[in-house]
Image: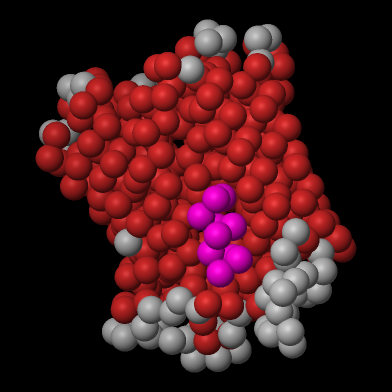
Amino acid sequence: MLKQHLQKPEIFLYLFAAAVPISFASWQALINNFAVEQVGFSGIEIGIMQSLREVPGFLAFGVVFLLLLMREQTIAFVALLALGIGTAITGMLPSVMGLYFTTVLMSVGFHYAETISQSLSLQLISRERLPQVLGRQIAVGAFTGLAVFAAIYILAEWLALDYLWVYLLFGCVTIMIAWVMYFGCPHFKGEAEQHKHMVLRKRYWLYYLLIFLSGARRQIFVVFAGFLMVEKFGYTVGQMTLLFLVNGVLTIYLAPRIGRLVSYWGEKRTLTLEYTGLVIIFTAYAFAEVAWFAALLYIVDHIFFAMAIALKSYLKKIADPADMAATAGVSFTINHVAAVVLPFALGLLWVVSPSLVFIIGAAIAFASLLLSQLVPGMPERGMETVFSTS
């Protein structure tokens, strides 16, 4: 029965969606405590480590050149091995250089796995079913993340298991799933042989811009929204963990429904809803003075992340089938341009006025809203924007 299920590309993609957060969520949940308690990191080393972690995302376009050496499913296997091994050996190298090394290894695996996951989803799933399958993938990832957090709490708090064994356990689980995916699943073929060189097409310009602005917006949320909760409203570790749990549960429930919404409404209307909501949310962040209201914004903001399905669906409809892998790599690089620049620049602005940081976030969301109006009601190849003539 299991072997029969492994013949389906959707099952392969769901396994992929589970394998990544098993390692990444465990690495993320423990890394700050491990870095301080075991390695003696200060703020300087933490900053360097986080910058190093973002570099592989910026270099995600390199996945195209790996296609010269191996098939995409092989790259997926290697990426998951790097992610799993990087996580598994983190506790074995409790030194500054050791943690830098394992962070980069883990991050290379994570970012290349995410890139290949997007590429294979776009290739293996029909345009009609893609939003729903993407929604289910997000739900699988969210459920896996919740299970990892719960397991870590039991292992660390109840069983007092050392960091070395916790990291080793979750890294090895990712490696085992990668093994099942590679040796248990057939080689799935997409619509076309993928290009093995960089692809930047003028007619994808709107997608590139929306992806760039999405990355900028996400950085503001990831870096500063949580920081606001702690600095301004005094949220404890327990309260922040509770917010993460609420976000995870809501994502499990809502992500598949958002996928169906994209199929029913279309990309333009979904993006319009997303960006309108984000303009309101970021503006509200700037003037929030009540802790419970800020928490509500944090939860709603996180829900809107799932609407990124609409951008992937838009790409599926406008891109040549042979462009999917190359465009997935390029889009990850474009998305991470903001990750290199914004945290430092806006961190300086934060000292002057935290509200201005979120006003900039609202302005970015408003720019996205304006650009989304250029998405056709029924996008397709040759009809990428409202200005296109098929």
Residue at 36% across, 43% down: 341
User: What is the count of numbered marks?
Assistant: 0
Name the residue at 48% across, 17% down: 353
Q: Quadrant of the C terminus?
A: bottom right
Q: Looking at the image, which residue sits at the far front?
A: 387
Please say if 232 is above or below 110.
above
Regarding residue 291, the answer to whether it shows in the image is yes
- For the N terminus, give its image quadrant: bottom right
Q: Main secondary structure of the magenta part?
A: helix
- Residue at (59, 65) in percent of width and height: 207
In the image, residue 289 sits, relative to residue 334, either above or below, namely above
User: Please, which colouring scheme is shown?
Assistant: secondary structure
Q: Position of residue 309 (x, y in %)?
A: 67, 58
Q: In this view, does 260 lie to the left or right of 3?
A: right
Q: Considering depth in this image, is 176 or 354 the residue closer to the camera?
A: 354
Residue 108 x %, y %: 31, 57
Taking the image as shown, residue 288 lies to the left or right of residue 272, namely left
Asked where in the image residue 198 lies, by quadrant, the reply is: bottom left
Relative to residue 164, is residue 111 drawn left or right?
A: right
Q: What stretch is highlighted in magenta?
A: 205-214
Visible residue check, residue 252: no
Q: How far across and how far down the image is residue 147, in percent?
A: 56, 39
Q: Which residue lies furthest to the right in this view?
A: 264
**In the depicted structure, whether residue 50 falls above or below residue 353:** below
Residue 208 falls within the magenta-colored stretch: yes
Residue 28 shown in magenta? no
Residue at x 21% of width, y 26% of height: 44
The percent position of residue 365, horizontal first and vertical second, equals 64, 43
